[in-house]
Amino acid sequence: MIYLLQRLGRTTCNSLAKTGRSAFFLAHGLSGVTDIALRPYLLIKQLYSVGVLTLLIITISGLFVGMVLGLQGYYTLSDFGAEESLGVMVAASLVRELGPVVSALLFAGRAGSALTAEIGLMKATEQLSGMEMMAVDPIKRIISPRLFACILSVPLLAAIFSSIGVIGGHLVGVGMLSVDEGAFWSQMQSNIDFYDDIVNGIIKSVVFGFMVAWIALFEGYDAVPTSEGVSRATTRTVVNSSFSVLALDFILTALMFGDI
Amino acid sequence: MQHSYTQDTLVGLFVACGIGALFFMALQVSNLGAYNHQESYLITARFENSGGLKVKSPVSVAGVRIGRVTAITFDLQSYESVVEIQIEAKYNTLPDDSSASIFTAGLLGEQYISIEPGGSETYLENNSEIDLTQSAIVLEEVIGQFLFKAAADE
């Protein structure tokens, strides 16, 4: 009984301590924005490794998600004779939900895990302590560029995902299933609002990028410096960031699109 | 630290693609290109019942969309629904005795306001009001009337 209580207390203390460490870590990482302004090439290098290298998987998945939406939407809508609404359906679901969420999930799997493994291994091979010995702040030098690169690239990736998805839906709907092209675009344009739908989708993806970057970088920085510890941290990154993206999506959707 | 120009180029390409995608969404997918930047004027219309009309519902004349609903409020004195309509400035020759009715696009479609032009020589201006209105048709009321009529006939 006492043992169980002890375990509960220890778990609570540990998780609180971890939350506190991650908050300080985030504040320290964000304060590195001045160093990035001094050394923009650090940011560009990270934009390449988190953004450009994720572009391919985002483009291909966006195309297929859009095509599947077009196909499934067509089958359901044609029962009601409302095939012309296919454009609205595809664009609304992509711009509001699927674009930001799926691209953030793919980003967590593709770039988040890589970031955790990279930083975890840097810690395990004592590169971070080495930097500290040379009076270089490892958080500002290593973490900040990656943090800002993620925050910048996730919205861009989400925008690319949604656009490619709309084009995919157009390929299937207009090209394969011969929905009227004019109705496809005009209904889409009259029902999708720039501020309500597109800007909100972008705000969502900025939040997701921030969250995924924070979790991935902190898990790497906080990993137990052994090969097992790094592998566990990588797993935790993917699981936790996917979970928080989905949970945050629900909260943000309720705030943005609800009439509460 | 060595500098790679290929990397710079690819990052530039990535950012350009992202911004291009944003522009594509703004102009091709959403309504930004069509309505928001044009000059417009406001008119109001009072309806006994505005039915399922919503903010941003279309307003059309002869089937051509000329504006949209910007606000729907309830007037406590007259118990009417006050609908504010924004009309594009280029359609400034609507007679002031025009009438507004709420119709439904298709059987289950969204509701919209249709303006029927009158014969007056003076035109609607900013903040003027349409006097002749016809309320939305509520399907339950029509069915109810039909049933009562059928019962009365027997």
Image (tube, rainbow, N blue to C red):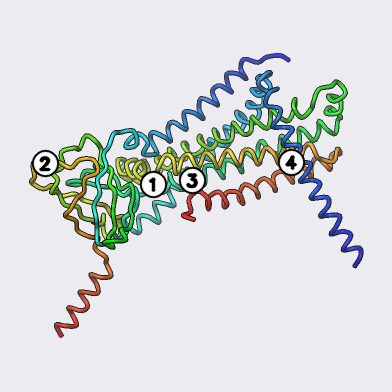
Asked if residue B59 lies left or right of residue A93, the reply is: left
Amino acid at pointer 4 = Ala
Residue lying at 30% horizontally and 58% vertically, measured from the top left: B75
Amino acid at pointer 3 = Arg
| Mark closest to the chain's N terminus, 3 or 4 | 4
Which of label 3 and label 4 is nearer to you? 4
Amino acid at pointer 2 = Thr
Residue A88, label in figure: 1
Measuring from the top left, give residue A196's x and y in whole percent.
Answer: 44, 44
- Residue labelled with disc 3: A96
| Mark closest to the chain's N terminus, 1 or 3 | 1
The chain that hosts pointer 2 is: B
Q: Are marks 3 and 4 on the same chain?
A: yes
Q: Are marks 1 and 4 in contact (CB under 8 Å)?
A: no
The picture quadrant where one finds residue A112 is top right
- Residue labelled with disc 4: A23
The chain that hosts pointer 1 is: A
Image quadrant holding the N terminus of chain A, namely bottom right
Q: Are marks 1 and 3 in contact (CB under 8 Å)?
A: no
Which of label 1 and label 3 is nearer to you? 3
Indicate the secondary structure of the residue bearing disc 3.
helix
Indicate the secondary structure of the residue bearing disc 1.
helix
Amino acid at pointer 1 = Val
Residue B122, label in figure: 2
Indicate the secondary structure of the residue bearing disc 2.
loop
Q: Are marks 4 and 2 on the same chain?
A: no
Asked if residue B130 lies left or right of residue B1, the reply is: left
Alpha carbon of mark 4 to alpha carbon of mark 2: how far?
A: 66 Å
| Mark closest to the chain's N terminus, 1 or 4 | 4
